[in-house]
Amino acid sequence: MSSYNIVVFAGKCDHCGPEVTAEGLKILRAIEKSSNDIKFSFQEHNLGGASIDATGEPLTDEALNAAKNADAVLLGAIGGPKWGTGKVRPEQGILKLRKEMGTYGNLRPCFFASESLVEQSPLKAEVCKGTNFNIVRELTGGIYFGERKEDDGSGHALDTEPYSRQEIERVTRLAAYLALAEDPPAPVWSLDKANVMATSRLWRKTVTEVMEK
């Protein structure tokens, strides 16, 4: 029997997080119940605003170490108006979790798991039938991790968007790997604003060079 240790930021995350994560747990428990070969062990920990309320930190060392040692992490929503924009903020927890675990690529597949679902779409069947693509989003660089300055009453605030070549290369390789796994290989579109932004020019140059290899 295969046993998997899953850290769950479920009832101890923010706003709709518990509701969303509860549905994921239902699926995992249904899989476990229907199989004699799989066993899940769940550990619950705080994250984000719930963690701030309980400990004063958006992510404790205990929760981080548990996540690092787990086979998977399941979490819901982070943040909300209750915690504002002070020095300690809920999103610092999820950003630290991403950095520490090296989860640099967010995958958002878009397809119909069953043809029977096509008719349930708000789009006409002839428009959406055959939809199959995957959005790959870079998670551990860019504007979320750049220098920021809150409005101090002057009516001025700023965010900066730093990117390194290494950060761009690895998410490009991830997109290429997923594309090459398709038969035939799927096309890859890279989205940037290279006519305006310096980071986008580095992004376009790096993506082009990696894909040409």
Image: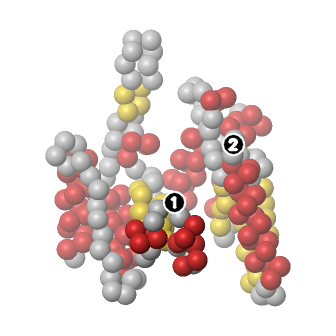
Residue 154 image point, x, y percent: 39, 12
Indicate left or right for 16 with 104 as reference.
right
Residue drawn 69% across and 41% down?
15
Residue drawn 34% across and 74% down?
176
Asked if residue 76 shows in the view, the reply is yes
Crowding at dot 1, Cα within 10 Å, few <14 / some 14-19 / many 20+, comes out as few
If the image is split into quadrants, where does the C terminus sit? bottom left
Give the residue pinned by disc 1.
122
Residue drawn 40% across and 83% down?
181
Residue 186 image point, x, y percent: 33, 78
Q: At numbered mark 2, what does the secondary structure look like: helix, strand or loop?
A: loop
| View extreme (left): residue | 195
Q: From the viewer's perspective, is the residue at label 2 or at label 1 nearer?
A: 1
Give the residue pinned by disc 2.
14
If the image is split into quadrants, where does the N terminus sit? bottom right
Residue 64 image point, x, y percent: 66, 53
Q: Nearer the viewer, residue 27 or 124?
A: 124
Indicate left or right for 205 with 93 as reference.
left
Residue drawn 79% across and 85% down?
35
Q: Given the image, on which type of amino acid does mark 1 rest?
A: Pro
Examine the rendered structure and indicate whether residue 106 appears above or below residue 60. below
Q: At numbered mark 1, what does the secondary structure look like: helix, strand or loop?
A: loop
Residue 81 image point, x, y percent: 62, 30
Q: How is the image coloured?
A: secondary structure
